[in-house]
Image: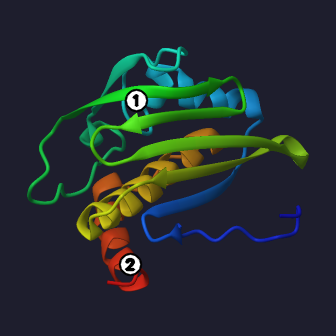
Amino acid sequence: MTELTPIEAYGALTAPDTLTIQRLLPAPVEKVWSYLADSDLRRRWLAAGVMPETPGASFELTWRNDELTDPPGARPDGFGPEHRMSCEMIACDPPRRLAFRFGQTGEVSFEIEPRSGGRTLLTLVHRRVTDRGALLDVSSGWHAHLDVMAARLAGIEPDPFWDAWVVLRRDYERRMPA
């Protein structure tokens, strides 16, 4: 990828069970890394929870998506105000790579690379998602969460999380093969 290559806003299936999403973020690598690794910053765009750096170590992530934006939007049926997930660290190489087991829905990795102008290319890969419903949920979820992080890094207020998630879920359902 060159500096001039546009980055597709939507994630793509890079294997039948693998989602890849890229974002060119308006912040240097160190700041993006802090939004991945620091629980207080991560809870502003994704989920709280102290992540150990040691491979094999267990940790828990806690989502409170209603708190990500103000207003949060209309929470869809089937989602509670809080969700907890047990995870396991696979790799932690500050400030370049973070990978962990994502509960029962595969593995997630973040690769971050510096770009010109103090920007950072973030590549998220979610592997081993074999169920179509789960794939649609994680695709729209990661997309919406990354949009919140990008807005926070740019110093602007993100769009209502749940409203964005609902639209993205429909978009991914049309975009991804059955």
Considering only order in the chain, which callout, 1 or 2, is on the residue closer to the N terminus?
A: 1
Location of residue 177 (image quadrant): bottom left
Helix, strand or loop for disc 2:
helix
Report if residue 155 is visible in the image.
no
Q: Quadrant of the N terminus?
A: bottom right
- Is 86 displayed left or right of 99 in the figure? left
Query: For mark 2, what is the residue?
Result: 171
Number of marks: 2
Residue 30 pos. (x, y %):
73, 27
Q: Is residue 13 above or below residue 177?
A: above
Q: In this view, does 131 lie above or below 64?
A: below
Helix, strand or loop for disc 1:
loop
Residue type at tag 1: Arg
User: Label 1 neighbourhood size at 10 Å, few (<14), some (14-19), many (20+)?
Assistant: many
Residue 77 pos. (x, y %):
9, 59
Q: Residue at x 38, y 78 (%)?
A: 171
Location of residue 168 (image quadrant): bottom left
Disc ID at residue 6: none
Q: In this view, does 174 lie above or below 115?
A: below
Disc ID at residue 43: 1
Residue type at tag 2: Asp
Q: Which residue is more in the foreground, 74 or 23?
A: 23
